[in-house]
Image (cartoon, grey):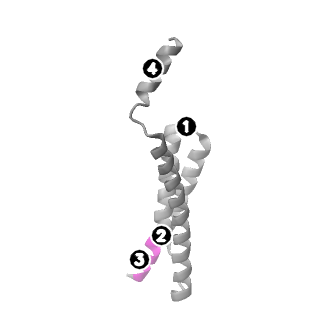
């Protein structure tokens, strides 16, 4: 394949892509994850202050499931080992908080 064929193929592959929109979406996702952890922290702190029950496991279950999904999808697309490790770590946190949530739920019933 010569230079012109490679360039033509690249142009064809990227024809429908909007790189500005992709960059904006990546930035928005990054900010959303940061806001999510802040909100989980606020909810847990308020629960601790107002009910004396400590952290809220349900919100952390949801948050860590989002993080685990994000990292595992990135791993399957990019094949970077650190994303697999983080994805599995976040998945473990998700499972732990889900067990705490079920424990609280069953204790209340």
In this view, the mark in front (3 or 1): 1
Helix, strand or loop for the magenta stretch, by majority: helix
**From what the image shows, is residue 64 above or below residue 8?**
below
Labels 4 & 1 near each other (Cβ < 8 A): no
Within-10-Å neighbours for mark 3: few <14, some 14–19, many 20+: few
Labels 2 & 4 near each other (Cβ < 8 A): no
In this view, the mark in front (2 or 4): 4
Camera sees residue 102: yes
Residue in view at x 55 percent, y 51 percent: 88
Q: Which mark is residue 79?
A: 1
Specify which label sits upstream in the sequence, 2 or 4: 4
- Rendered location of residue 54, percent (x, y): 55, 80
- The residue indicated by pointer 4 is 8
Magenta part of the chain = 99-108
Residue in view at x 45 percent, y 20 percent: 8
Marks 4/1: CA–CA distance: 27 Å
**From what the image shows, is residue 58 above or below residue 23?**
below
- The residue indicated by pointer 3 is 106
Q: Is residue 15 left or right of residue 56?
A: left
- Rendered location of residue 32, percent (x, y): 50, 60
Marks 1/2: CA–CA distance: 29 Å
**From what the image shows, is residue 2 above or below residue 94?**
above
Residue in view at x 53 percent, y 59 percent: 31
- Rendered location of residue 78, percent (x, y): 53, 38
């Amino acid at each position: 394949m010569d230079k012109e064929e490679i360039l033509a193929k690249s142009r064809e592959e990227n024809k429908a892509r909007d790189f500005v929109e992709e960059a904006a979406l990546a930035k928005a996702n990054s900010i959303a994850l940061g806001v999510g952890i802040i909100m989980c922290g606020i909810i847990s702190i308020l629960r601790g202050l107002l009910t004396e029950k400590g952290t809220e496991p349900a919100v952390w279950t949801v948050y860590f499931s989002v993080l685990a999904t994000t990292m595992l999808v990135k791993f399957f697309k990019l094949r970077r080992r650190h994303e697999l490790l983080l994805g599995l770590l976040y998945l473990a946190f998700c499972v732990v908080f889900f067990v705490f949530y079920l424990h609280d739920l069953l204790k209340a019933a």
